[in-house]
Image (tube, rainbow, N blue to C red):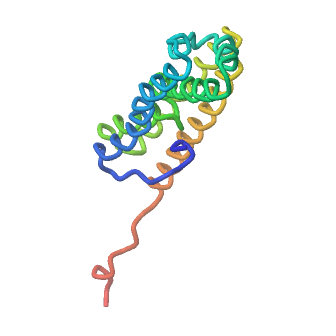
Protein backbone atom coordinates (compact mmCIF):
# COMPACT_ATOMS: atom_id res chain seq x y z
CA UNK A 1 0.00 0.00 0.00
CA UNK A 2 3.02 2.28 -0.23
CA UNK A 3 1.67 3.84 -3.42
CA UNK A 4 -1.37 5.04 -1.50
CA UNK A 5 0.67 6.81 1.14
CA UNK A 6 2.33 10.14 0.66
CA UNK A 7 5.14 11.72 2.56
CA UNK A 8 7.28 14.73 1.99
CA UNK A 9 10.71 13.95 0.54
CA UNK A 10 13.47 14.07 3.12
CA UNK A 11 15.79 16.01 0.85
CA UNK A 12 18.34 13.24 1.29
CA UNK A 13 18.56 11.20 -1.89
CA UNK A 14 20.04 8.12 -0.22
CA UNK A 15 17.24 7.97 2.38
CA UNK A 16 14.51 8.50 -0.23
CA UNK A 17 16.10 5.87 -2.46
CA UNK A 18 16.17 3.41 0.47
CA UNK A 19 12.46 3.96 1.08
CA UNK A 20 11.66 3.50 -2.61
CA UNK A 21 13.69 0.28 -2.73
CA UNK A 22 11.84 -1.04 0.33
CA UNK A 23 8.79 -2.13 -1.68
CA UNK A 24 10.93 -3.91 -4.24
CA UNK A 25 12.92 -5.59 -1.44
CA UNK A 26 9.74 -6.94 0.16
CA UNK A 27 8.56 -8.35 -3.17
CA UNK A 28 11.97 -9.94 -3.77
CA UNK A 29 12.01 -11.48 -0.29
CA UNK A 30 8.55 -12.97 -0.79
CA UNK A 31 9.40 -14.66 -4.13
CA UNK A 32 11.37 -17.61 -2.71
CA UNK A 33 9.20 -17.91 0.42
CA UNK A 34 5.92 -18.12 -1.51
CA UNK A 35 7.49 -20.20 -4.28
CA UNK A 36 8.83 -22.82 -1.87
CA UNK A 37 5.55 -22.94 0.06
CA UNK A 38 3.65 -23.41 -3.18
CA UNK A 39 6.06 -26.16 -4.26
CA UNK A 40 5.62 -27.85 -0.89
CA UNK A 41 1.81 -27.77 -1.06
CA UNK A 42 1.46 -28.81 -4.71
CA UNK A 43 4.50 -31.10 -5.02
CA UNK A 44 5.33 -29.49 -8.37
CA UNK A 45 7.22 -26.53 -9.79
CA UNK A 46 4.57 -25.95 -12.48
CA UNK A 47 2.69 -23.27 -10.53
CA UNK A 48 5.85 -21.62 -9.21
CA UNK A 49 7.06 -20.93 -12.76
CA UNK A 50 4.01 -19.93 -14.80
CA UNK A 51 3.32 -17.93 -17.95
CA UNK A 52 2.50 -14.37 -16.78
CA UNK A 53 0.56 -13.71 -19.98
CA UNK A 54 -1.66 -16.72 -19.39
CA UNK A 55 -2.53 -16.66 -15.70
CA UNK A 56 -5.98 -18.13 -16.33
CA UNK A 57 -4.62 -21.63 -16.99
CA UNK A 58 -2.37 -21.51 -13.93
CA UNK A 59 -5.29 -20.30 -11.79
CA UNK A 60 -7.45 -23.21 -12.95
CA UNK A 61 -4.63 -25.66 -12.23
CA UNK A 62 -4.07 -24.13 -8.78
CA UNK A 63 -7.76 -24.26 -7.91
CA UNK A 64 -7.84 -27.95 -8.88
CA UNK A 65 -5.14 -28.57 -6.25
CA UNK A 66 -7.35 -27.16 -3.49
CA UNK A 67 -8.04 -23.87 -1.73
CA UNK A 68 -4.64 -23.64 -0.03
CA UNK A 69 -2.80 -24.19 -3.32
CA UNK A 70 -4.96 -21.61 -5.07
CA UNK A 71 -4.48 -19.05 -2.27
CA UNK A 72 -0.70 -19.54 -2.25
CA UNK A 73 -0.54 -19.37 -6.03
CA UNK A 74 -2.62 -16.17 -6.01
CA UNK A 75 -0.26 -14.56 -3.50
CA UNK A 76 2.79 -15.76 -5.44
CA UNK A 77 1.46 -14.65 -8.83
CA UNK A 78 0.34 -11.24 -7.60
CA UNK A 79 3.66 -10.70 -5.82
CA UNK A 80 5.60 -11.54 -9.01
CA UNK A 81 3.41 -9.32 -11.16
CA UNK A 82 3.74 -6.46 -8.68
CA UNK A 83 7.51 -6.92 -8.60
CA UNK A 84 7.66 -6.81 -12.40
CA UNK A 85 5.45 -3.72 -12.54
CA UNK A 86 7.52 -1.96 -9.86
CA UNK A 87 10.76 -2.68 -11.69
CA UNK A 88 9.61 -2.17 -15.27
CA UNK A 89 7.09 0.69 -15.10
CA UNK A 90 8.64 4.04 -14.13
CA UNK A 91 5.39 5.77 -13.19
CA UNK A 92 3.87 6.94 -9.94
CA UNK A 93 2.56 5.47 -7.65
CA UNK A 94 4.70 2.41 -8.43
CA UNK A 95 8.13 2.04 -6.86
CA UNK A 96 9.69 2.42 -10.31
CA UNK A 97 8.35 5.97 -10.47
CA UNK A 98 9.65 6.70 -6.99
CA UNK A 99 13.08 5.33 -7.93
CA UNK A 100 13.20 7.57 -11.01
CA UNK A 101 12.22 10.59 -8.93
CA UNK A 102 14.87 9.83 -6.29
CA UNK A 103 17.63 9.47 -8.85
CA UNK A 104 16.60 12.65 -10.68
CA UNK A 105 16.10 14.73 -7.53
CA UNK A 106 19.70 14.14 -6.50
CA UNK A 107 20.82 15.61 -9.80
CA UNK A 108 18.22 18.26 -10.71
CA UNK A 109 16.36 19.13 -7.51
CA UNK A 110 12.96 17.99 -6.26
CA UNK A 111 10.64 20.10 -8.45
CA UNK A 112 12.47 19.39 -11.71
CA UNK A 113 12.66 15.71 -10.77
CA UNK A 114 8.92 15.61 -10.11
CA UNK A 115 8.19 17.24 -13.47
CA UNK A 116 10.46 14.77 -15.27
CA UNK A 117 9.03 11.83 -13.33
CA UNK A 118 5.52 12.89 -14.33
CA UNK A 119 6.53 13.21 -17.98
CA UNK A 120 8.34 9.85 -17.99
CA UNK A 121 5.36 8.30 -16.20
CA UNK A 122 2.93 9.64 -18.82
CA UNK A 123 5.06 8.13 -21.59
CA UNK A 124 5.26 4.82 -19.71
CA UNK A 125 1.49 4.87 -19.17
CA UNK A 126 0.86 5.44 -22.87
CA UNK A 127 3.17 2.54 -23.81
CA UNK A 128 1.61 0.32 -21.15
CA UNK A 129 -1.90 1.10 -22.37
CA UNK A 130 -0.84 0.38 -25.94
CA UNK A 131 0.71 -2.94 -24.90
CA UNK A 132 -2.40 -3.83 -22.89
CA UNK A 133 -4.62 -3.14 -25.88
CA UNK A 134 -2.37 -5.11 -28.23
CA UNK A 135 -2.35 -8.23 -26.04
CA UNK A 136 -5.99 -7.73 -24.96
CA UNK A 137 -5.11 -7.41 -21.26
CA UNK A 138 -7.59 -5.14 -19.47
CA UNK A 139 -5.63 -5.18 -16.19
CA UNK A 140 -2.61 -3.71 -17.93
CA UNK A 141 -4.76 -0.95 -19.41
CA UNK A 142 -6.13 -0.30 -15.91
CA UNK A 143 -2.60 0.01 -14.51
CA UNK A 144 -1.80 2.43 -17.34
CA UNK A 145 -4.85 4.58 -16.59
CA UNK A 146 -4.02 4.82 -12.88
CA UNK A 147 -0.32 5.39 -13.58
CA UNK A 148 -1.12 8.01 -16.21
CA UNK A 149 -3.44 9.88 -13.86
CA UNK A 150 -0.90 9.78 -11.02
CA UNK A 151 1.90 10.86 -13.37
CA UNK A 152 -0.16 13.79 -14.61
CA UNK A 153 -0.94 14.71 -10.99
CA UNK A 154 2.76 14.60 -9.98
CA UNK A 155 3.75 16.75 -12.97
CA UNK A 156 0.91 19.22 -12.44
CA UNK A 157 1.70 19.57 -8.72
CA UNK A 158 5.38 20.23 -9.46
CA UNK A 159 4.49 22.85 -12.06
CA UNK A 160 2.10 24.53 -9.63
CA UNK A 161 4.68 24.60 -6.84
CA UNK A 162 7.31 25.96 -9.22
CA UNK A 163 4.98 28.77 -10.31
CA UNK A 164 4.28 29.68 -6.68
CA UNK A 165 7.99 29.60 -5.93
CA UNK A 166 8.69 31.99 -8.83
CA UNK A 167 5.99 34.47 -7.72
CA UNK A 168 6.79 34.41 -4.03
CA UNK A 169 9.00 37.11 -2.60
CA UNK A 170 10.14 36.93 1.00
CA UNK A 171 8.89 39.61 3.37
CA UNK A 172 11.35 42.35 4.20
CA UNK A 173 13.71 41.74 7.07
CA UNK A 174 12.61 43.80 10.09
CA UNK A 175 16.25 44.75 10.69
CA UNK A 176 16.29 46.54 7.30
CA UNK A 177 13.23 48.67 8.07
CA UNK A 178 13.68 52.33 8.99
CA UNK A 179 13.00 53.24 12.61
Residue 53, x across and y down, in percent: 61, 11
Q: Say left or right for 159 vs 170.
A: right
Q: Percent from the top left, x then y, of residue 125?
A: 59, 24
Quadrant of res 66: top right
Left or right: residue 171 compared with residue 60: left
Q: Is residue 116 above or below residue 42?
A: below
Name the foreground residue: 146 vs 76: 76
- State how many labels appear: 0
Q: Residue 172 at x, y = what percent?
A: 36, 74
Above or below, 1 against 71 in this view is below
Residue at 66% across / 29% down in the picture? Answer: 145
Q: Is residue 60 visible?
A: yes
Residue 120 visible in the picture = no
Foreground pick, 13 / 138: 138
Quadrant where the C terminus is found in the figure = bottom left
Measuring 53% from the left and 39% from the top, which residue is drawn there?
155
Observer-nearest residue: 141 or 49? 49
Q: Quadrant of residue 135?
A: top right
- Location of the N terminus by quadrant is top right
Q: Looking at this view, name the residue that lies furthest to the bottom.
A: 179
From the top left corner, tell me how far across and down residue 24 is, in percent.
Answer: 42, 33
Residue at coordinates 61% horizontally, 31% vertically from top-left? 148
Answer above or below: position of 6 versus 35. below
Amino acid sequence: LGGLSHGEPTGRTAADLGVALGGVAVNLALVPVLGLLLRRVTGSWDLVFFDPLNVGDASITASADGLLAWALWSLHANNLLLLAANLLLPMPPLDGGRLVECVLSGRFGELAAARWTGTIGLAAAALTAFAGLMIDEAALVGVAVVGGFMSWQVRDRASFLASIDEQWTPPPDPADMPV
